[in-house]
Image: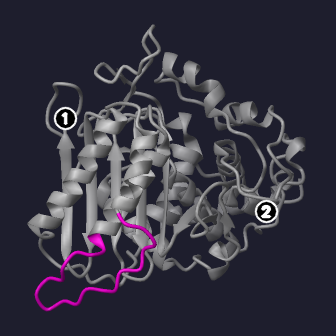
Amino acid sequence: MRRAIAAIAAFGLAIGLAGCAPEPTVIDLGVDQADGALSDDVQAQLQSLTETAMTAAGAPGAIVGVYAPWAGQWVAGLGVTEPEGAAVAADMTFKAPGVSRAMTCDVLYGLVERGTVDLDDTVVEWVETYPNAKDITLEQLCDGTSGIDTYLDVLLPRLLKNPERVWNARELAAYGLAKDRAFDPGTRYGESDTGYLLLGVVLERVTGSSLNALYQEFVFEPLGMSASSAPLNMPTGDVLNGFRSGTSKEGKTRCKTPTDVTALSPTAGGAAAGVVTDVDDLATYARALAAGARSYDTEGRFADARTLRSQPSWFTADGGAFQAGSLVGQYGSIPGYLTAAFADRETGLAVVVVLNNSRASAALVRTLAWQLAADASKAPAAEGRTAPESGLPWTAESLAGTISETAVCS
């Protein structure tokens, strides 16, 4: 393996310097967030949209954060943690599927900046045990253009039967790699949780560090994301319970009696969906991603954005993130949670939302986030502030049909 010696040397150096490393400086995102809350009318609109989506998803609870720099913010827990349970608190933590992928790419770009790896390195240059990935580059894994198929659909029953098991990412990735490729590498974008797991395996091998340690170094600490981690087991304490509705013998979704899957180990999602966080941290993250605030955030990361099949031309993917008009972010699903986080690169508007039932498609929570962004973008300015011109190519009303189409409950 051509880089084995370099990887070992880097690991040894990291150990030697660990004791004298300075405290990290938190990056200033340059967002002048107005104090106070959004107007009552705007809050009512946002709450109504969220509650409609909760019903459609069969989610007993949700946490929402909407941050408009010129107008104020609305951060709220809605519903209950479980059917007939306690009220949801806005500061509860939850899994962040989808967003974890962008963070994994952050680590990649951070290591590229250091000269540790190159984007065009192939997988087998670092991990020889995947000969069927010899023509796949690290950049393609990050961009979602590797052609590798998914693993979660195959393993879902096993994951739910033994939720607390700590999974090895290599074992999970093997299920996706065993499938035929969906397309030739580099030819188009395609959903691949396996690709991000494989990228995580490479990054851990390169550095000799755990995925959690890499996230802390390149993502969480520089942004002051103190509520975020990639643990082996789901933390206890103020955690939003996560559910997944099953199917009755009659073929109907069990909307009223979903199964609690909170205990599912974050390792089941790994580098694709294993981060645990809260709404404030995710809002900070989305803003940093959209603004390109970190030193490793190069313009080239989103320069070759691919359009998605059967989607509008303004919705593209690249660099481990999605771009929707001027919004940049991610969204996804893991048993228990549908999560989305987007920020506007032009205005600093940030929207984060989690629904605690994962039976519906992740497209539902993505659409909700876009609805919230559309309404919040029109929020009146606070005293002494100026509202920006709205530039999103949709309205909350124009997306209502997608919520209905993706609904699993009513």
Could one spot residue 360 in this view of the protein? yes
Question: Where does the image place residue 200, in percent across and percent down from the top left?
Answer: 65, 50
Residue drawn at 66 percent across, 64 percent down: 307
Coloring basis for residues: one colour
Mark yes or no: residue 90 visible.
no
Q: Please, is residue 187 above or below residue 223 in the view? A: above
What secondary structure do most residues of the magenta stretch adopt?
A: loop
Local packing at callout 1 (Cα closer than 10 Å; few below 14, some 14-19, many 20+) is: some
Task: Tell me which label, 1 or 2, sits earlier in the chain.
Answer: 2
Query: Which residues make up the magenta segment?
Result: 376-395
Instruction: Residue 23: give x, y in percent of width and height.
Output: 40, 71
Q: Which residue is mark 1?
A: 80
Q: Could you say which quadrant of the image residue 2 lies in?
A: bottom right
Tell me how far mark 1 sits from mark 2, CA to CA: 51 Å
Q: Is residue 276 left or right of residue 279?
A: right
Find disc 2 in the rendering and name its residue: 6
Magenta-colored stretch includes residue 56: no
Residue 6, placed above or below residue 89: below
Q: Secondary structure at mark 1?
A: loop
> Circle 2: is it few (<14), some (14-19), or many (20+) Cα within 10 Å?
few
Amino acid of disc 2: Ala
Residue 388 falls within the magenta-colored stretch:
yes
Q: Position of residue 104 (x, y in %)?
A: 58, 57
Report which quarter residue 92 is drawn in. Answer: top left
